[in-house]
Amino acid sequence: MAKTIASATQKGGVGKTTSTVNLADAFVRRGRKVLLIDLDPQSNATSVLSEVNPNSLRHTTTELILDPDPAVATACIRPSRIEGLDLVASSIRLARAAETELIRRNTTTLSKRISLLKDVYDIILLDCPPNLGRLTGNALCAADYYLVPLKGGDIYSLDGFDDLEMTVREARDDNPKLTRLGVFFNAFDGRKNVAKLLAKTANERFGVEMFKTCVPDAVAFQEAAVMSKTVLETQRDGTAAKAIVELADEILARLGMGAQHGQA
C-alpha cells in the first residue's frame, strides 16, 4: 500500500518541485516504485520527467481530478524518462479549469482517484502549486503525509508556515490521518550567518521533525534542470546528489520503509 506524500508550501522559490523530482529519482534508485502527480499548472516537474509536451496529452492531472469516470485514473498515468517512476503530467489546462471547477466540488475528489492506485506503488508524491488554493487543499486531503521545504538563508522562509498549518487543519476535517512527515532546508549554505540563525530558529520550533540533511545551495540543480534531468542523472557523485540520497534515506526511515535495497 503506497505512502502518499504532498510537498506543500505557500511560498514560491523554495525549491519544492526541484526537491520533489530529485527525491522521486532517489526513491526509485532505492528500489521503490513511485508515482509523481504534478499538481502545479506551471508543469515544471512534468518538463523534467516527460519527453512529451503536456499540452498535447489527452489525459493529465486536470482529467484525473475532474473526469467523473474512475477509469481515467489509470489512463492519466504515463511512464517518465526514469524507469520505475511514473507520472501524471500537468498542463496549463489545470490553471484554466481545475481551480474554477473545484469550487463546485468537495475536497475528496483527488483522494478517491489515488485510492485506486495505492496498491500499484510504494510511494505517491504530490507536487503542489506554491500557494494554498484548492489544488493544495485536495492534495492534503489525499495525502498520508505532507513534507515542508524551507529555503536556507531566506529570512522570510518561515513566513506563511502558520497559514499552511491552518490549511492542514482544514484538510484534517476530511483527512484526520494527515501527518507532517518533516521539515527540511533547500538551497542551504551553512557558511552564512543568516542560514545558521534560520537553522537554529527552525530546530527550536520543529525539533525532531527537522530532517538532519540540508540540501545545499548548488548550481548542479540548475544545470540539471536546464537539461531536464535530475542531479542523480548528471552528477551522481556530487555533493547535491549525495544530499538528495541522504534526505531520501531519512524519509524512507521515517516512513518505516528502510533503504535496504536498490541502487545507491
Image (cartoon, rainbow, N blue to C red):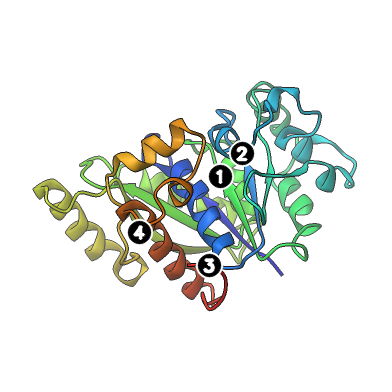
Residue type at numbered disc 4: Ala
The dot on residue 127 is 1
Q: Which residue is mark 2?
A: 39
| Mark nearer the N terminus (2 vs 4) | 2
| Mark nearer the N terminus (2 vs 1) | 2
* Cβ atoms under marks 4 and 1 closer than 8 Å: no
Residue type at numbered disc 2: Leu
Callout 1 crowding tier (Cα within 10 Å): few <14, some 14–19, many ≥20: many
* Element at label 2: loop
The answer to whether residue 130 is left or right of residue 183 is right
- Closest to the observer: 5 or 216? 216
| Mark nearer the N terminus (1 vs 3) | 1
| Mark nearer the N terminus (3 vs 4) | 4
List x then y, in percent, for residue 232. 46, 52
* Element at label 1: strand
Q: Which residue is mark 3?
A: 263
Distance from Cα at disc 1 to Cα at disc 3: 24 Å
Residue 11 seen in this snapshot: no
Callout 4 crowding tier (Cα within 10 Å): few <14, some 14–19, many ≥20: some
